[in-house]
Amino acid sequence: MSDAKAPVATAYPKRKIQLVDFLLSFRWIIVIFFVLPFSFLYYFSIYLGDVKSERKSYKQRQMEHDENVKEVVKRLGQRNAEKDGLVCTARPPWVVVGMRNVDYKRARHFEVDLSKFRNILDIDTERMVAKVEPLVNMGQMSRVTIPMNLSLAVLAELDDLTVGGLINGFGVEGSSHIFGLFSDTVVALEVVLADGKVVRATKDNEYSDLFYAIPWSQGTLGLLVSAEIKLIPVDQYVKLTYKPVRGNLKELAQAYADSFAPKDGDQDNPSKVPEMVEGMIYGPTEGVMMTGMYASRNEAKRRGNVINNYGWWFKPWFYQHAQTALKRGEFVEYIPTRDYYHRHTRSLYWEGKLILPFGDQFWFRFLLGWLMPPKIALLKATQSEAIRNYYHDHHVIQDLLVPLYKVGDCLEWVHREMEVYPIWLCPHRIYKLPVRPMIYPEPGFEKHKRQGDTEYAQMYTDVGVYYVPGAVLRGEPFDGSEKCRQLELWLIENHGFQAQYAVTELTEKNFWRMFDNGLYEQCRRKYKAIGTFMSVYYKSKKGRKTEKEVQEAEQEKAEQETPEAN
Ligand SMILES: NC(=O)C1=CN([C@@H]2O[C@H](COP(=O)(O)OP(=O)(O)OC[C@H]3O[C@@H](n4cnc5c(N)ncnc54)[C@H](OP(=O)(O)O)[C@@H]3O)[C@@H](O)[C@H]2O)C=CC1
Ligand SMILES: C=C(/C=C/[C@@H](C)[C@H]1CC[C@H]2C3=CC=C4C[C@@H](O)CC[C@]4(C)[C@H]3CC[C@]12C)C(C)C
C-alpha cells in the first residue's frame, strides 16, 4: 500500500505571519506595473537582436565568431593569477534562469564576457547538425528551425534557457526518453581552455575526455564558445493524447511508466513508443499522462480533429488545461509544434500562480496574457532578499533525476516530506558510456531488464517538484533547508541526481557521493583548470563565499594533486 495514505498533517503549531508573506501577497503590483512591461521590452530587444543576427549570412556570423573567440583568448591571457580572482562568465547572477544564489559572482572573480556569442552559426541539413553559440536560447532556436521542419532533438521548454547553460548544467524535455539529456545530443564542443588553447572536443577525438566531462561541470573546465547539436526532422503539429489516471502514488507511477515504456522491453520500436512524453501528478491519487506524436498539417486539419493553437496569449495555462482530462476523460488534440515545445513558458510551469495569483483567470489572460511570462531575470532583479530567502526556506524548486523503477518511491517520499503538487514527470535516458562522467546509470542495471531500460541506457525520470509545500499552505512550520538536505540524502541512497540549477545543502563529501568526480578531476588537472576556474562544488554551494575561501580550497586541491599530475 502506498505511504501516501498515511496521514500527512497532524497538529503543528501555526507559523507566524511574517513580513515576507505580505511582500509575496502584494508582489503582483510590482509584477504588473514594472516587471511585465519591462519584460515585454526586454523580450522585444532580444527579438530584434535575433532578427539582426539572422540577417547576416552564416559565413559572416562564423567570421565574427572567430574574431570573438580571439577576444576571449586575449581576455583570459590578461588574467594575472597572482592578483585576479578565478574565471567565470560575466552573466550577472540575476540574469540566469537557476535558483542558486550564484554567490561566487559576488566575491572577487575574473569575468569573461560572452555576450556576443548569441548567434546560430550554421544549420547543416545534410549532417543534421546545428552549430550554435552558447547564448543562443531555446525560443530563438525553435523560431528558426521549426519553419524548416527541424528541431533540436531535445528542446527545453523555457524560452530563456541557453545552450551554454543546458550543456554545462543539464537539460531535459519530453523527447529525452529517446535522445537522453540535452548534452547527449551534442556532437562537438568548441572550448577555450585555461591556457587559451581553443579545442574542438568530440566523442571520439583526442579531447573525448573533455567532451564527456563538460556536462554538469558548470563552466569549470573551460569556456564553451560553440556547440554542434543534433537536429531531428519534425512535423508542424504534435498530436497530443491526455490520459487521466487514478490510484495510489505507486499506481500512478506505474501508469506513467506504461505510457511510454513497452512492457516487452521493445523500447526502440517507434510504433510502440511515443515521440513526446510527460506526466503530471495533481495529487496523491490522480494524474494525467500525455503522449505526443508529430503530425502533418494535413492530418491536423482533417475533419473531426481538434486543433489547439496553444500559442495564443489568452489560452488557459497548460497544466490547468491538461488537468481537465480528469473531468472530461481521455482526449486528443493537435498543437502547433512550437506552441507545444514552449507550453510551460507562459505560466512558468505552475510557479506563475504564486507570482500572479489571478494570472490564470479568464479576464487577465485576455487583457494582459500577451505580456506573459514575466522575465525570470526581472523577477530576480526585483525580488528582495526576503523573497529570495522565502524561496529557499518555505518553497520547493527541485528536479530529482531518479531511476524509472523508483519513481513510485520518490513520489511517496515527496508526498510524505513535502506534499507539493502538481509534480512534473519527464522520462530521460542515462547512457552507459565508455567513461564515467558526473552522472551515470546504476552499475549492472542492464542485467535486471527493467521497464524502459535497454542494454545501452537506463531509463530515468526527472521528477519536478515546484511549489508551496502543504505545510506552508496550512500555515505550519516547514524547514526548507532541512528538507532539501533530506531529499539530497534520499537521492544519494537511490542513485539519483539533483539538478544543479536548484539550491543545494550538500556538503562537499556528499556532493561527490551523488556525482562522480573521477573523470571531472582528471580533466581539471589535465586541462589545467585548477587555479583558473572554480570547482563545481564551490559554484553550487549555498551561502556567500569569500575570495579567500575559494582560493584556499583551490590551493589545497592543487597541492594534493600536483605530484600526481607531474
Ligand atoms: N527544461 C530544462 O531542462 C530546464 C533546465 N534548467 C536549468 O537552468 C540552467 C540554464 O540556465 P541558463 O540561465 O541558461 O544558464 P546559466 O547562465 O545559469 O549557466 C549555468 C552554468 O553553466 C555555465 N555556463 C554557461 N554558459 C557557459 C559557457 N559558454 N562556458 C562555460 N560555462 C558556461 C555557467 O557558468 P558561470 O557560472 O561562469 O556563469 C553556469 O555555471 C541549466 O543549468 C539547467 O539545468 C532550468 C529550467 C528548465
Ligand atoms: C528544471 C525545470 C524547470 C524548472 C522551473 C520550474 C524553474 C527553473 C527556474 C525557476 C525560477 C527561477 C527564478 C524565479 C524568481 C523568483 O522570484 C520566483 C520563482 C522563479 C520564477 C522560479 C520559478 C521556477 C523556475 C522557473 C525543468 C527540467 C522542467
Image: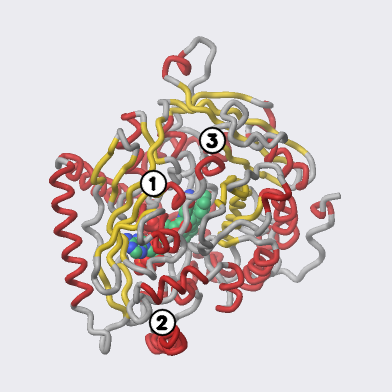
Give left or right: position of 65 versus 408.
Answer: left
In the image as oriented, which residue stretches furthest toward the top? 303
Between the C-alphas of marks 2 and 1, the distance is 42 Å
- Mark 1 element type: loop
Q: Earlier in the sequence, mark 2 or mark 1?
A: 1
Q: Which residue is mark 1?
A: 159
> Is residue 298 placed above or below 321 in the rendered structure?
above
Please name whichever residue, 498 or 335, is drawn nearer the observer in this view of the structure: 498
Between the C-alphas of marks 3 and 1, the distance is 18 Å
Q: Quadrant of residue 313?
A: top left
Q: Residues within 10 Å of mark 2 (few under 14, many from 20)?
A: few
Q: Which residue is mark 2?
A: 565
- Tell me where residue 256 appears, x and y as whole percent: 68, 40
Residue lying at 30% horizontally and 34% vertically, measured from the top left: 125
Q: Which mark is residue 276?
A: 3
State whether label 1 is within 8 Å of ligand 1.
Answer: no
Residue lying at 50% horizontally and 43% vertically, measured from the top left: 179
Q: Which amino acid, mark 2?
A: Ala
Please name whichever residue, 37 or 395, is drawn nearer the observer in this view of the structure: 395
Q: Which mark is residue 327?
A: none
